[in-house]
Image: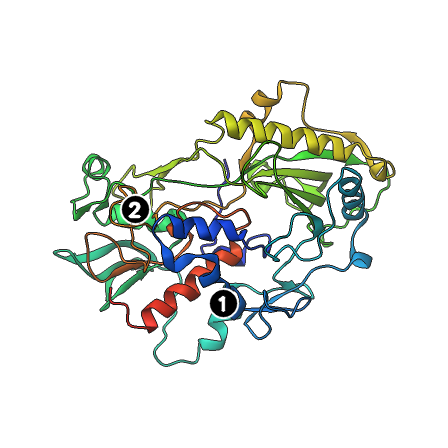
Amino acid sequence: MWVPRGRVTGGSSAINGQFFLRGVPEDYDDWADRGNDEWSYEKVLPYFRKFETDLDFPDDFHGTDGPILVRRFKEHEWLEPQAAFRDAALDAGFPYVEDFNHPDATGVGPLPLNNVDGMRISANVGFLNPARHRLNLTVRGDCLVRRLIFEGKRATGVEVESGGERFIVEGEEIILSAGPIGSPHILMLSGVGPEEQLAAAGVPLVHHSPGVGQNLRDHPLLSIGYSTKPGYPMDPDAPRYQVILRYTAENSPLRNDMQIVMISFASEPVATGGDGRTSEGIAIFPVLNKAVGKGEIRLGSADPTVQPLLDYNFFAEEEDRRRFRDGLRLCLSLGEHESFKDIIEARTSPSDEALDRWFMTYARTCHHISGTCKMGPAGDPEAVIDQYGRVYGVEALRVADVSIMPDCVRANTNATAMMIGERMADFIAEGVPA
């Protein structure tokens, strides 16, 4: 499975789909209920508002002067497949939603995006560029972090490789924000992780932390593809995403645990031989949020250039298979709606194989991997950090990225990643010691 990451300034916010959805309030309240009381919805909402300028909804739930601009395409801007999808969802009984970042929102409507006038407002553009002039800030690219340096149990620096040279960067406190794959990988390369994995890879143990790399959470998705009518105009530069559906699966106690995305220009991924710009038609993506099953990241080598093993363990639980199966059937029903009759020529997938076998073969990640350096109280055997980001068992080391989520939010992780950065920055500025 293709798992690209944003190895560029701004991280994956520089390469993602620019969805700017927040999780539902229950997601953050669940974090608090697990012993992380500083992360309830009430306490994180000010941080979502702090970095946001919502160009459509300047109200109590949205920011008005933050560095990240957020907008939604107006209905007159929607491409035909997007409008057809809206009509199909409304006829299926789903309500219309104007603002998916409202805490009570569920239904079909325009997708919030951190893209304005064709410009991606990434973390680099929004946060870093305005601060580049600061004399206490150095940004250095083309650097591979090989490991963290410890003196006893205290983190004192980072071993870096750049241009064939290896050197040590020292600091009074080290903040690891390498993402949900990079952060646990670096910890294990540095001797912080499950003892048996480190020993098998030949990494000297600094601290046995069995939760590092465990609790891998993500959102599986599947593409249901449709060829378009002969001569139907397809523009690779037109917006691919404008409208989505968020809803609760039948008999599920988890609100908004499903998401369906309308793709108005579907192309074969570069990873499977496509060029990313040659149209294969349109597509409808069902996405499973709040999966019961979870996977792991395992260390395979002490060499930092060797990628760790990612075992997503998708659909190991029957409840996940049931909800996704029902979601697929809903997508197929929406695609048969009369609003698509002048657009769709034929369905190109799925085949007539059994649905379970089909999605076990072809499902892939939403790239919302998270949870691999879980935040939690000291009594949680899977917890890697406390709620202030401090790594258990060592000193002067924090983690601040989506790897700290106890569970993945019921949304794309873009906005929540930025919220975590803002929240952790305040802990540090307030003098919470590492």
Question: Circle 2 — which element?
Answer: loop
Instruction: Give left or right: position of 287 versus 162.
Output: right
Task: Judge whether 44 appears above or below 410 on screen.
Answer: below
Q: Identify which residue, 213 or 248, lies in the foreground.
A: 248
Give the farthest residue toward the left. Answer: 152
Among the 4 quarters of the image, the one containing residue 205: top left
Pointer 2 or 1: first along the chain = 1
Among the 4 quarters of the image, the one containing residue 331: top right
Mark carried by residue 383: 2
Looking at the rendered structure, the kind of residue marked 2 is: Ala
Mark carried by residue 46: 1
Q: Residue at x 49, y 67 (%)?
A: 46
Instruction: Identify the coloring.
Output: rainbow
Residue 157 lies, in percent from the top left, at: 22, 62
Q: Residue at x 32, y 69 (%)?
A: 428
Q: Residue at x 57, y 26 (%)?
A: 322
